[in-house]
Amino acid sequence: MSTKTEKKHEPRFHIVKREGIPTLQATLYRLGAVVAALIVCAIVTMALTGENPLRVYGTMIQGAFGTVRKFWNLLQSLAMLLCVSLAVTPAFKMRFWNIGAEGQVLVGGLASAACMILFGNSLPNGVLLLTMLLASMLAGAIWAVIPAVFKATLNTNETLFTLMMNYVGIQLVAYFARVWENPKGSGTIGIINAATEKGWLPAIGGQKYLLNILIVLALTIFMYVYLKYSKHGYEIAVVGESQNTARYIGINVKKVIIRTMLFSGAVCGIAGLLLVGGTSHTITTETAGGRGFTAIMVSWLAKFNPLMMILTAFLLSFLEAGAQQIATDFGLNKSFSDILTGIILFFIIGSEFFINYQIKLNKSHGEVE
């Protein structure tokens, strides 16, 4: 009777999670990823357009910093993206996948617009601004806490729930754009209180975006302290690590989920206020501008660190401003600039793999009995 010897084929390498990596080494990985991305972008640019890639990169810098106005627009874009990123960070750190920031920002902005339209002629401007702040925070908090309550009590899927709430928020804005349309038949609200500027955030030093930037800067510092040093921040971190561990040490997980989402939604409401009262002075379905989704990337790339999110938000805002300038100066459609942006983001996100994992060769590679 013959017997067969079974042989197994060992893989050439395997992936191992790193225990930890020095900050300097992680930074070098990220810088290396950016350099590699720029080289690939240069090759793609020459292959598809024949343009000098150095001119293209120079145009990106010109689009972001070319004039004082462009520089302030860049700071404004950075501040708004950072504000929404700060809002989603507590939920993500708690492992509550809040994909609904877009809708929460919109309903917060809608609440601000409603206050401007309904009370613009009856309240002093200071009282009106305070009313707008409270209304926008309340609206954003309510929009965020609805899926939180269902998650805490019925264990529903928060990703789908918060995502669907976005579409409800968009349709609400579309409905009231018809109710408050100005002029009639336009289907848009138009600039609210253009003559009186009631409900408009004041300009500081002649710069209309400076107050927005200062508010977001204060929020960034507050969020860093809140998450790192407060009791609530500690509870968020524990719940994010393990809900069972949190329950074992006496943390009320349901309470933490609901409280955190109330807070997250309120900050989204503030972003809505800044976009309506301090930026565009109107509300449309495009007011949030996709920031609710881009903020997810900003928060994750920064490892939920509010201070690091300043850098990641700056990078994305710079790429957006530069991409628009490329499309204008070279007569290219926006798709090409999006290709360059996508390549750079791909390399940056890919570098996180090598920061968190390492590839090890198997010494016993080959067939073993």
Image (cartoon, rainbow, N blue to C red):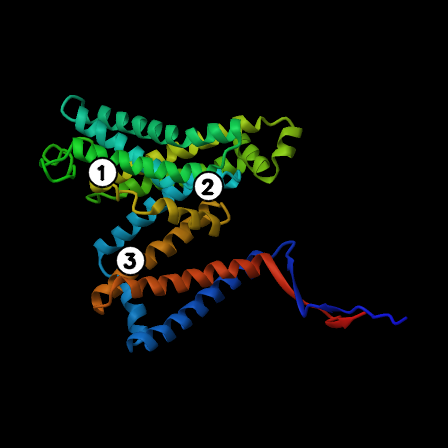
Please name whichever residue, 25 or 259, is drawn nearer the observer in this view of the structure. Answer: 259
Q: Amino acid at mark 2?
A: Thr
Q: Do the numbered discs 3 and 2 sit on residues whose CB atoms are within 8 Å? A: no
Q: Look at 41% across and 32% down and name the residue there.
A: 144
Q: Residue at x 86, y 70 (%)?
A: 3
* Residue behind mark 2: 89
Who comes first in sequence, dot 3 or dot 2? 2
In the image, which is nearer the foreground, mark 1 or mark 2? Answer: 1
Identify the image quadrant of residue 278: top left
Nearest the eye: 366 or 5: 5
Q: Nearer the viewer, residue 47 or 206?
A: 47
- Closer mark to the observer between disc 1 and disc 3: 1
**Looking at the image, is 200 positioned above or below residue 69?**
above
Dot 3 lies on which element?
A: helix
| Amino acid type shown at disc 1 | Ile
Q: Residues within 10 Å of mark 2 (few under 14, many from 20)?
A: many
What amino acid type should be assigned to the residue bearing mark 3? Ala
Q: CA distance from mark 3 to mark 2?
A: 24 Å
Which residue: 50% across, 33% down?
156
* Disc marking residue 283: 1
Horizontal and vertical percent position of residue 298: 42, 50
